[in-house]
Image: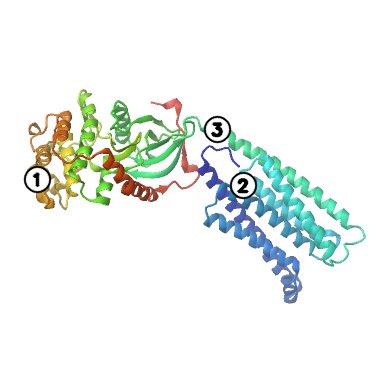
Amino acid sequence: MTDDPTGEQSRALLQNRIALVGKVGFFLSGGFLLASAILPIIFMGPNAGAIAITKLSYLFHVVATAVLGLCWLVSVRVQLSPKGLAILDASMAVCVSGLLALMGAFIHSPGAVGTFQATLAIACILALRAIAIPSSGNRTLGVCAAAGAVAIVSTWLALRHTGVPALGADTSLVAQLINQGMWLSAISAVATLASRVIYGLRREVSQARRLGQYVLHEKLGEGGMGIVFRATHAMLRRETAIKLLPSSRVGSDAIARFEREVRQTARLASPNTVAVYDYGRTPDGVFYYAMEYLDGLDLHDLIDATGPLPAGRVVHILQQICGSLAEAHSIGLVHRDVKPGNAMITQRGGTPDVVKVLDFGLVKDLERGEDVGLTATGALTGTPLYMAPEAIRDTAAFVPASDLYAVAAVGYFLLTGTHVFNGNTVLEVCAAHLHAKPESPSARIGIPVPAELERLILQGLAKDPAERPSGAIAMREALLACPVEPWTEKSAEQWWSATGHKLVAERNGQRVRVAGELASTIAIDLAQRS
């Protein structure tokens, strides 16, 4: 019924509007229903009220009100398909019109007053539908024509066959039906025009807003720097992930960190680094960027679901992380927040277990000495559970070797399901990174770990950066040289078929859908594009 390219958004809007019509119609009809029972009591006594509610006209009024309430309830409680909503929309208008016509036909009053009252009530329902429900002019004309035809036939049957008293010398049955038909035709014309104008304006506004527009769906995650949503672009129809910095968090430092994350990530082209498609600001000043959507699991969720990984898979994952960092380090960038939550496994191009490194928001450009952390002097920037000792001592001391320390800590987590160091406070964790000797992975879990891999992990956790692998490439080569049972593509495919897809589906089912039609779209401000 709408021209919106995002089918789910259009469906949800249509269902909300049908619920609105049912709700408003229910309360309007219910109000008149109550009045028709109370007014006779006020002006003619209790007996008159009792007589009023026993008439057939009152019964049909009750049923019409109940139909409106039922449509409201169904629209609120049941998620219907577009076809189901179209049927519900038309059925509500047609059924209520027929019932209201029967109500009017059974009102015993001279001069066809009852039929006129019913026609007025039908006009209110059809006008309400035209205003609230997004519908083309042709569809509105069809619904109104069907509703009008049912109303006229219902009136004719009631007056012709139910023994209703004579209408009066001045009003024949045919004349009454013609008069009712003329009024219903006029109502249909007005409703059709209203739908055509409102529908056309909505379509024009929608098309105007689609230039660079993203439609938000579920919230994927939220961190200190922003909120991430799954989204689609109105033109490209490609799924993306949109990261927003809400206005409640806007400050010069936060904006600088967020914008720098985009610029730095956009410089990277490794297949193991999340790709950035677009960035800018919305008309109301909210900074955003669009990146590739990854339908997978971050390493933290993976370990929570499966426990420690086999050594071969740990090597497979870590060497891909090193590949991403190698490119970043080669152009003078340090990630500074390597952790399980910032690395995802997914499927790309038919290849399972592809690792993507995310969130370069804490990246530091070594060439210019710029620090996007922009925190107060001495404040920690990063995640203490994976932070290198030199970075704890001085946030300006982040070097490529600091990222390698974090990679080793991630490897430790993947092998054991536990962190290298734990503590009740951040201070305890930081003190352990500075002074404590890490327990070997095999001792931690009580199961042998390949010696070369364990030695490499512990080397990466050395307190002195100079004692760690000489670089991300060297660490990657050392990982690939470890004699472990290989994690093959076949192994990965079997895991994804048996477990991975189910875990991803469960994770997706826990996402929070964006509430409200207005909150579900963002448009870019081309005039202020960075």
**Amino acid under label 3?**
Gln
> Which residue is more in the foreground, 345 or 516?
345
State which tag comes first along the sequence, 3 or 1: 3
- According to the picture, the residue beneath numbered tag 1 turns out to be 438
In the displayed structure, does residue 167 sit left or right of residue 421?
Answer: right
**Label 2 Cα neighbours within 10 Å, binned few <14 / some 14-19 / many ≥20:** some
Of the two numbered discs 1 and 2 in the rendering, the one whose residue sits closer to the viewer: 1
In the displayed structure, does residue 306 sit left or right of residue 177?
Answer: left
Residue 450 lies in what quarter of the image? top left
> Which residue is more in the foreground, 345 or 273?
345
Give the Cα distance between marks 3 and 1.
Answer: 59 Å
Q: Quadrant of the C terminus?
A: top left
Instruction: Give how far across and how far down residue 437 sits, in percent.
Output: 7, 45
> Which residue is more in the foreground, 232 or 504?
504
**Amino acid under label 1?**
Pro
Report if residue 396 is visible in the image. Answer: no
Q: Residue furthest bottom?
A: 47
Point 45% across, 31% down: residue: 524
